[in-house]
Image (cartoon, grey):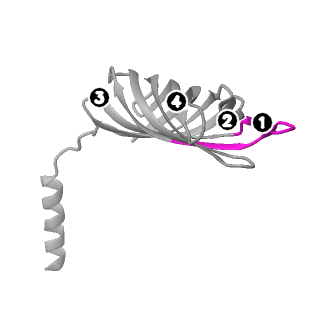
Amino acid sequence: MRTYLCAFGLLAALLGATPAHAQFSNRSLGLSLGYMDFKRTAGLAGTPFIGLEGSLYVENGFEVVSLSKLMFPKDTFATPEKRVVGLAPSIGIRYLLLEETLRPYIGTDVSYLIVFKEQTSNFVGIGPNVGLDYFVTDSVSLGVRAQYNFYIALNEDTQTSLTGSVGLAAYF
């Protein structure tokens, strides 16, 4: 009797199932490589970086994005100059101008820059960015991005940086 009930339940589930529907991929994870020109912010020279990025599509063309950069700039205030470690996590929002295979966007980020040297330097920044993503498949995109940041810190002048990067992202 149990076997019949299990078979009947399985048959009802199979006959009552509806076809699967594809869902819009609204999350991404990716890697980026780029260059950050500090313009001598706190005595730091420009440097390449590697970044981990992610996005979450909200609605109506808006995405919440995050990009965390790891870099090793030269400290030009040190004698002799030496490499230091810098981390720059950021979170922001961007607006997709098109939501097709080619996706240009504009946005803004709030970032935090911490540089580990003899005395740790901390900066808070905000800056506009522009970019373009191109989908090579339904779930993989290549992109370019440019950003200009304004950094502030206590007892420091306002500093700026210009960042450019290329990235590869997978959507799921």
Residue linked to disc 4: 150
Give the quadrant of the N terminus: bottom left
Nearer the observer, disc 4 or disc 3? 4
17 in the magenta segment: no
Label pair 4/3, CB-CB below 8 angstroms: no
Which is more toward the observer, 49 or 44?
A: 44
Which is more toward the observer, 44 or 100?
A: 44
Pick whichever of labels 4 and 3 is earlier in the sequence.
3
Residue 121, by quadrant, is top right
Identity, as a three-letter code, of the amino acid under mark 3 = Gly
Q: CA distance from mark 2 to mark 1?
A: 8 Å
Q: Is residue 24 left or right of residue 161?
A: left
Q: Which type of secondary structure does the marked residue at label 3 adopt?
A: loop
User: Mark on residue 7?
Assistant: none
Q: Which type of secondary structure does the marked residue at label 1 adopt?
A: loop
Q: What residue do we see at 12% from left, 53% from top? A: 16
Nearer the observer, disc 1 or disc 3? 1
Residue 28 x, y percent position in the rendering: 42, 39
Residue linked to disc 1: 77
Mark 2 crowdedness (10 Å alpha carbons): few <14, some 14-19, many ≥20: some
Q: Is residue 83 above or below residue 33?
A: below
